[in-house]
Amino acid sequence: MRLSEIAPIRPKRSGELRVAALRQAADQASDAVRLERERQRIRQAQTALGKLQRSRTR
């Protein structure tokens, strides 16, 4: 491999770093929303299941 084939690695600029940080924060927020919705669905299903079991025992 020749030195001319290797692309120089330059540090990212402050604007690029900010965009990358914002993208990462957005990804984390969307994951948190998805997980919370799953928790709410599970909680709702467990409540419905509990009501159904209580109604069958009576």
Image: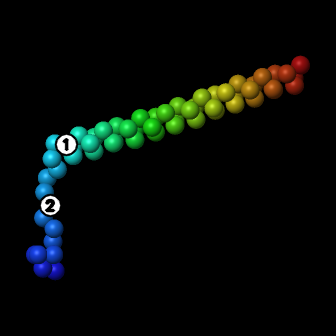
Residue 30 left/right relative to 42:
left
Residue 32 point in image, percent of width and height: 46, 34
Label 2 sits on residue: 9
Q: Report the quarter where the C terminus lies.
A: top right
Q: Nearer the viewer, residue 34 or 13?
A: 13
Residue 47 point in image, percent of width and height: 70, 25
> Quadrant of residue 15 in the image?
top left
Q: State which mark lies toward you, 1 or 2.
A: 1
Q: Nearer the viewer, residue 36 or 10?
A: 10
**Residue shown at 21%/46% (left/top)?**
16
Verify CB contact (< 8 Å) between mark 1 and mark 2.
no
Residue 58, compared with residue 6, is above or below; it is above
Crowd around label 1: few <14 · some 14–19 · many ≥20 (10 Å): few
Residue 25 left/right relative to 49:
left
Q: Report the quarter where the N terminus lies.
A: bottom left
Q: Nearer the viewer, residue 54 or 26?
A: 26
Residue 17 point in image, percent of width and height: 21, 44
Crowd around label 2: few <14 · some 14–19 · many ≥20 (10 Å): few
Look at the numbered disc 1 and give the secondary structure of its residue. helix
> Quadrant of residue 4 in the image?
bottom left
Q: Furthest residue to the top?
A: 58
The residue type indicated by label 2 comes to Ile
